Amino acid sequence: MAAATTAPSFHRAVTVLLLLAAVLSCHFNVATAVDPKCHCPGGRCRGLGVNYGTVADDLPSAPRSVELLRAAGAGAVKIYDANPNILRALAGTGLPVAVMVPNEAIPSLASSSAAAEAWVSTNLAPHIPATRVMYLLVGNEVLSNRAIRSTWRGIVPAMSNLHRALRSHGIRKVKLGTALPMDALSSSYPPSAGEFRADIAGDVIRPLLGFLNATGSFYFVDAYPYFAWAGNRDAMSLDYALFEGAASSHYVDPGTGLTYTNLLDQMLDAVVAAMGKLGYGNVKLAVSETGWPNAGDAGESGASVRNAATYNRNLAARMSKNPGTPARPGAKMPVFLFSLYNEDQKPGPGTERHWGLYYPNQTKVYEVDLTGQRPSRSYPPLPPADDTDSSPAWCVLAGGVGGKAVNETAVQAALDYACQQGSGTCAAIQPGGACHEPDTLDAHASYAFNSYWQQFKNAGGTCFFNGLAETTTKDPSHGSCKFPSSVD
């Protein structure tokens, strides 16, 4: 990135002056959208990749989304299917692209080389080389879904067929893999104890690692320190999860003597240890998803703009130096941040819909430079990270009790579902019950949603009901009708 050493001294001086002017220009315009050229002479820095999901209403067009990716300094992009509009929008940008094969396509691709040939011909070949596709991920978290267990052994055959199909089209630079979360491991603590689940280690993971090793590809892992921290808050420092842990919070693995300064490294080295125990300790590692939620339901502690910005800024700064991990110092890893947008149509708890760098209206959730070159002092102040865990919360019909139901049929179906779960979930809204009045669909639905959520949230129950419900910190109780809260 330095000026050529053979350049005349006059040209070197002019170059220095021009670079100084660019630096000063960037420094005094820190409130504007981040331009990677400000921190990377020639724009050659490679920022974190970004997952570009589309499970949301009213998203910007694909060309505009690509502009937003580049404004944030993204160095790559991962998409969840071979969306032709997105692939065309990425043409000519030079951004490395990871394309995902849907889970439901795996059985046919595994059993038929003709199906793999057709898939590549239809979905990839028309876009290469104009679009720089570098990775093809066969399935998303397939091994986490026991309902499709019959698909598990098809992952590697599908990859093999796709590999041959790519070669038949003269496409040789695309690496194949599959995205797996941390639950592929039965043990991850301490990192040296990392081990794959017994039900997949021999039949699925070992052949997968053999394929990745033979083709020089990566083991792609979805690694979320947020979830690991949220499930162990009493034993784990938030700062440690956010790459800001003091020396007193650092962890020494008793099995290896390696010192860990952050939770992500611990998680990644657990995968490294697990691969080593199957004889493939040298397979390269990539992070297909990581990040931190910028909001969530009441009661989802730690999900805030402040913590999300802190995690992603620190991650970008760290990865810009290619630190590797304690077990693999200096190793280069592709890393993809989740996600480009807050996606309001995703099911599950509130955090599922709040991982974005941007709102769908194109405004930033917070400032971040994914190249990791922007000085931390140049960012504007962040809002405080409110701890919502100590505040009572309720689950009610979206719009509040008394609000008109948008779809009465859907609300009735959701109410019926809630009342059929647990014991006495809807007893209070039966005739004569304390919450029977007002005898309206909306009022009864709010009570049923809340009763269900309070009973089952610790077992994975969510306040969502296909988008019909929302959490609130305003007590919906009225008269003698008491709505149980999250702190009861």
Image (spheres, grey):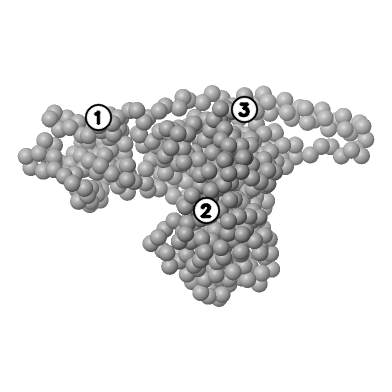
Q: Which residue is pictured at 84% across the width and 37% down the height? A: 3
Q: CA distance from mark 3 to mark 2?
A: 37 Å
Q: Which residue is pictured at 15% across the width and 33% down the height? A: 481
Q: Which residue is pictured at 18% across the width and 46% down the height? A: 423
Callout 2, which amino acid? Glu
| Element type where label 2 sits in the image | strand
Q: Position of residue 141 (x, y in %)?
A: 48, 56
Comparing 399 with 212, the one in front is 212
Within the image, what quadrant is residue 206 found in? bottom right
Q: Is residue 182 rendered to the left or right of residue 209?
A: left
Label 2: how many Cα within 10 Å (few below 14, some 14–19, many 20+): many
Q: Which numbered marker is on residue 376?
A: 3
Q: Count how many numbered circles sit on residues in the image.
A: 3
Callout 3, which amino acid? Ser
**In this rendering, the label closer to the viewer, 3 or 2:** 2
Callout 1, which amino acid? Asp
Q: Position of residue 283 (x, y in %)?
A: 64, 56
Comparing 314 with 189, the one in front is 189
